[in-house]
Amino acid sequence: MDWLEALILGIVQGLTEFLPVSSTGHLLLGRQIFNLEEAGLFLDSMLHIGTLLAVMTVYWKDILQVIKKPFSKTGILLIAGTIPTAIIGLAFKDFFEEISKTGITVGWEFLVTGLLLWWADSFKRNGYKGIEEITIRDALVIGTFQGAAILPAVSRSGLTIAAALFCKIDKKAAAYFSFLLSIPSIAGGVVLQSKDLFTSTAPSIAYSSLLIGTIASALFGYIAVKWMIKLLQTGTLKGFAIYVWLIGLIVLGLQFSGKM
């Protein structure tokens, strides 16, 4: 892997982790394009660390408050939202890993993500709950949706934002809780992938390429978070839905034709 490939994958990870289009699905496609199946799996962990740094930079004040008062309203909601994600991730870890390796369902997953985004967009105007009105039940629902997003081409941010809108949470609070909830989710994913850091694939990636990819992931992840916060308040999710539908159809076409 050269530095340019690492840079491209870092940009892709940073943008797609927080835009509702599935970072894992895009990285899976990127690894296939660059023929980096082995090294790419190792690189994934570092790129996710980059996006973790990005969202922590945006919400560092809120993180400090949760650390100081872990049983505050926000802390309890984050715990409640993380529990179903963790249960789903641990219970179906082997299943999700196998699907990720084959990529056989990726096209369909992109299509499902688009359907949920299109549907959720119609709920945006009906949200009335601020962060203080979010209930533990809401957090559990959002966390369950986040758990389903462990599938490679199902967007984590897309599903959590959609779930929040379905729960009548307003757009600002939906973005806030979705991105804050991503912190334990991404951190947990890095821990589960940590075994890749100690495999024989590690030496095949230059440290300079790792650094470039991680920095790009962090920088573009920060940009994506800031942009999505603004977009949710005034824009629409339907453009993202159309985009993932197109990607899904292209992937399915390539798979059916035997070219992927």
Image (cartoon, grey):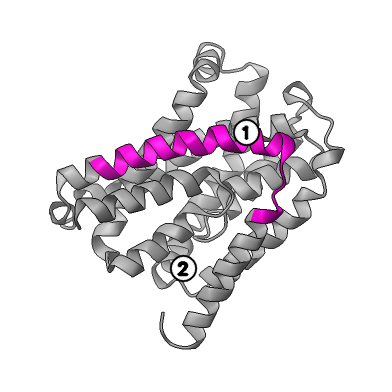
* Circle 2 or circle 1, nearest the eye: 1
Picture quadrant of residue 143: top right
Residue occupying the point 29% across, 66% down: 34
Marks 2 and 1 sit apart, C-alpha to C-alpha, by 31 Å
Q: Residue at x 71, y 42 (%)?
A: 235
Q: Main secondary structure of the magenta part?
A: helix
Residue 46 screen position, x and y as percent: 31, 43
Q: Are marks 2 and 1 in contact (CB under 8 Å)?
A: no
Three-letter amino acid code at the position of disc 1:
Ile
Q: Nearer the viewer, residue 237 or 28?
A: 237
Please say whether residue 86 is one of the residues in the magenta stretch.
no
Q: Nearer the viewer, residue 62 or 114?
A: 114
Q: Which residues are magenta?
A: 212-239
Disc 2 marks a residue whose amino acid type is Ile
Q: Specify whether 254 is left or right of 204.
A: right
For label 1, the residue is 229
